[in-house]
């Protein structure tokens, strides 16, 4: 009977040791995954900020383009003629522009 108890005690100790190793491995894996998740979260945050900045720049560009187009239409309706781009003129965005023919 004592031998059976000793054998069972040895098995319980072996199982406890296996559970401790498994737990330690799970804790290490969890720590690694948490660190990886924080890195991913930080990258995502940075990418989101970059996308928001790019979107704001795009909105500004579109608004400037609309303002320029509006000015061009207003100028053209007051008798200005369309002229082809020449390399001495400075443009932002288009190869054609409207210019007062009197200048």
Image: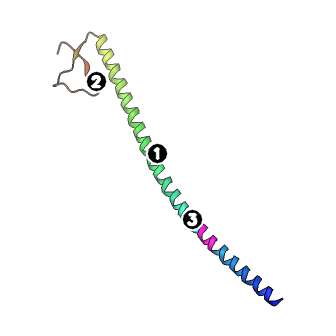
Secondary structure beneath dot 2 equals loop
Which quadrant of the view contains residue 8? bottom right
Instruction: Give how far across and how far down residue 20 sits, in percent.
Output: 65, 75
In the image, what residue occupies the spot 26% across and 9% down? 79
In which quadrant will I find the C terminus? top left
In the picture of the structure, the residue carrying the numbered disc 2 is 94
- The residues tagged by marks 1 and 3 sit, at their Cα atoms, a distance apart of 28 Å
Depicted 76 relative to depicted 12: above or below? above
Q: CA distance from mark 3 to mark 2?
A: 56 Å
State the SS at label 3. Answer: helix
Badge 1 is on which residue? 48
- From the viewer's perspective, is 77 left or right of 6? left
Q: Nearer the viewer, mark 3 or mark 2?
A: 3
First in sequence, mark 3 or 2: give its number: 3
Circle 3: is it few (<14), some (14-19), or many (20+) Cα within 10 Å? Answer: few
Q: State yes or no: residue 52 in magenta.
A: no
């Amino acid at each position: 009977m004592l031998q059976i108890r000793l054998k069972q005690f040895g098995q319980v100790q072996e199982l406890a040791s296996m559970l401790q190793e498994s737990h330690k491995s799970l804790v290490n894996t969890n720590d690694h995954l948490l660190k990886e998740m924080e890195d991913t979260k930080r990258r995502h945050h940075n990418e989101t900020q970059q996308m928001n900045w790019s979107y704001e720049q795009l909105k500004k560009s579109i608004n400037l383009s609309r303002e320029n187009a509006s000015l061009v239409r207003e100028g053209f309706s007051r008798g200005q003629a369309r002229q082809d781009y020449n390399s001495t003129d400075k443009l932002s965005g288009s190869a054609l522009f409207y210019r007062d023919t009197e200048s």
